[in-house]
Image (cartoon, grey):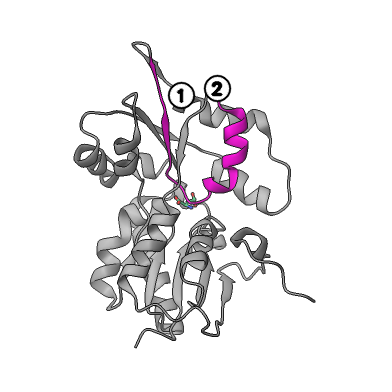
Amino acid sequence: MSANRPVLIVDSGIGGLSVTREVRALLPGLSVVYLADFAAFPYGDWDEAELTDHVVSLTAKHVAEHGPCAVVIACNTASTLVLPGLRATLDIPVVGTVPAVKPAAERTKSGLISILATPGTVKRDYTFDLIRQFAPDVAVTLVGATGLARMAEEKLAGRAVDGARLAAEIVPCFKEKRGKRTDTIVLGCTHYPFLVEEMRALAPWEVDWVDPAPAIARRLADVIEAPDAGTARFDRYISTAGVAFDYLPFIGEKPHDS
Ligand code: DGL
């Protein structure tokens, strides 16, 4: 009976829209309730126990309110903490977003990959476990970026991206070791795909940037009963700060005619 129920997609801000646009493309009949937790942004700076309690109770509250068929935690910083707690609390599928270590380890030819994520995500046990499990023979550099999520928020709010600040955040990802160079960088925060063009332009050399969003949309499609493409949708984009945001250009749809 999940066919007419929305999916609830949660992030600290606009980052989860990078996942939402893939969900839109793959499941065009599925309604979306998108929750931007602007009041708590950025999650990357939060204490782990406090963030876990916060996201579990916020998500449970919105599940009770909107009756979704599934939840997507479209945030690495939160997913690397809250998935067990949410799955124990909710009786619907919970899809998480965690650093794409496995695909990066499979793709690299040089054996040098980097994970670009928030300061929270790069110190999680969950992230270390992913590396141990999926990249035991790969040299992995973890880079905790302090300002990138905010830069993505600013870009989507219409402000210019400061190239020097962006370059300083990404340059620690580029390593050279015994004649080999980093060739694969994981975008370990859902905000970062919105900055990938600038990252490409400022990169010291060409690399493969891994965005896990298409895989998350496919995972969601696996765990729900997808509505037909022609099903009438009702989408809601809400935030904990009570501010409206203009999301449509970022999920590949045209703004409504006013
Ligand atoms: N979009 C979030 C992530 O994927 C985090 C941004 C933040 O709130 O620090 O990690």
Please tell me which residue is depicted at 73% across the width and 51% down the height of the picture. 158
Mark 2 burial class by Cα count in 10 Å: few <14, some 14-19, many 20+: few
Label number found at residue 17: none
Label number found at residue 204: 2
> Which of these two is toward me, 120 or 9?
9
Please tell me which residue is depicted at 36% across the width and 46% down the height of the picture. 99
Mark 1 burial class by Cα count in 10 Å: few <14, some 14-19, many 20+: many
Q: CA distance from mark 1 to mark 2?
A: 7 Å
What residue does disc 1 label?
Answer: 174
Q: Position of residue 136 (x, y in %)?
A: 20, 32
Q: Position of residue 146 (x, y in %)?
A: 51, 38
> Which of these two is toward me, 229 or 236?
229
Mark 1 or mark 2: whose residue is earlier in sequence: 1
Labels in figure, total: 2
Q: Position of residue 154 (x, y in %)?
A: 66, 49
Assess whether residue 182 is covered by the magenta stretch.
yes
